[in-house]
Image: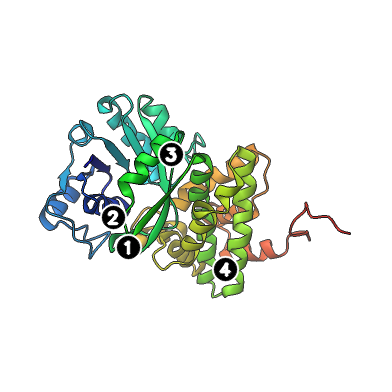
Amino acid sequence: MLKISVIGAGSWGTALAHVLNRNGHAVTIWSALEDEIVLLKEKHEQTEKLPGVKLAEDILFTADIEEAVLDKDMLVLAVPSPFTRETAKKMAPYVKEGQMIVSVSKGIEEDTLMTLSEIIRQEIPQCTVAVLCGPSHAEEVGIGLPTTLVAGACTREAAEFVQNAFMNETLRIYTSPDTLGMELGASLKNVIALAAGMADGLGYGDNTKAALITRGVTEIGRLALAMGAEYETLSGLTGMGDLIVTCASKHSRNRRAGMLMGQGRTMQEAMDEVKMVVEGVFSAKAAVALGKKYHVELPIIEQVNEVLFCGKTAKDAVKELMLRDRKAEHEKLDWE
């Protein structure tokens, strides 16, 4: 049995805490919001963000970051990506040398263009960092529907430590050394999911969705490979798999926000209606900046930014994508 704290009491953190508790670990959930902790202590259920998933009575809840971090075998960092750095700073004084921190959120920091694991290493250099992601929604993991994720770390030992902690009969965990590819796939797919949602909001069909998913993974792959990620990661669970589920699922907050924008809402109106952090909005500008830095063309992501921040309509963005210069699908294939 491990002593594990989940730092962040949103839907994903709560679902993972539920899994870890069912696996026999001693689990604590931390939130910066006192009201959220009071609710969880009273109801043992995240009634707003993950209704229907009843948490065990032996799960502990705290708003004290020192209590959450000290004397734990593993810390699961599950706050939304915009709050990763400030939360890591709060944790840092209490993290012991080599303590395992598993990043389970998705995003790229706009100002620094750093992945979340890079932020954690910068703020808490004494820790061991791992990443856990893949095609998953908290609503399904929380009720035990079969799901597969990937645990990534710099060493096999660290990745397998995470694998052993989380894996059970409904949650299968693979391992990978390519944390960069995993995090890029997990972050950038949210931007493509916004585009997929916009197409749904406009009333477009399956043909459009298939095109956005396929060309979206091409864009993510071009950038990730330029940055040093591995092709196998992009074609796997944390690349294509995560992209498919986020673009197609009724649970996807990014797809839902995009759909609202396709129906005419502004970005802010869409985020307010979704009522949870829409990670793709925060990764979109960073993705464009990375494309410029590495000289990679990202037409879908660039058009999503135009809709989010420049007032372009979703319909005009799709039209511009369709009327781009004629090209071959794969430039490296030779004609006879």
Secondary structure at numbered mark 1: helix
In this rendering, which labeled residue sits more in front, label 4 or label 1? Answer: 1
Q: Residue drawn at (56%, 56%), measured in percent from left and top? A: 304
Amino acid type at circle 3 is: Leu
Q: Are marks 3 and 4 in contact (CB under 8 Å)?
A: no
Q: Is tag 4's residue or tag 1's residue first in the polypeptide sequence?
A: 1
Task: Name the residue that disc number 4 marks.
Answer: 209
Task: Name the residue that disc number 2 marks.
Answer: 15
Q: Is residue 281 left or right of residue 77?
A: right
Q: Is residue 36 left or right of residue 160?
A: left
Spatial CA distance of label 4 from label 2 is 29 Å
Q: Are marks 2 and 3 in contact (CB under 8 Å)?
A: no
Q: Are marks 4 and 2 in contact (CB under 8 Å)?
A: no
Q: Are marks 3 and 1 in contact (CB under 8 Å)?
A: no
Q: Nearer the viewer, residue 274 or 306?
A: 274
Quarter of the figure with residue 165:
top left
Spatial CA distance of label 2 from label 3 is 20 Å
Q: Are marks 1 and 2 in contact (CB under 8 Å)?
A: yes
Q: Is tag 3's residue or tag 1's residue first in the polypeptide sequence?
A: 3
The answer to whether residue 78 of the structure is visible from this angle is no
Secondary structure at numbered mark 4: helix
Task: Name the residue that disc number 3 marks.
Answer: 116
Amino acid type at circle 2 is: Ala
Q: Is residue 114 left or right of residue 235?
A: left
Spatial CA distance of label 1 from label 2 is 8 Å
Image coords of residue 42 (percent x, y)? 10, 55
Task: Name the residue that disc number 1 marks.
Answer: 139
Query: In this rendering, is residue 122 above or below 283?
Result: above
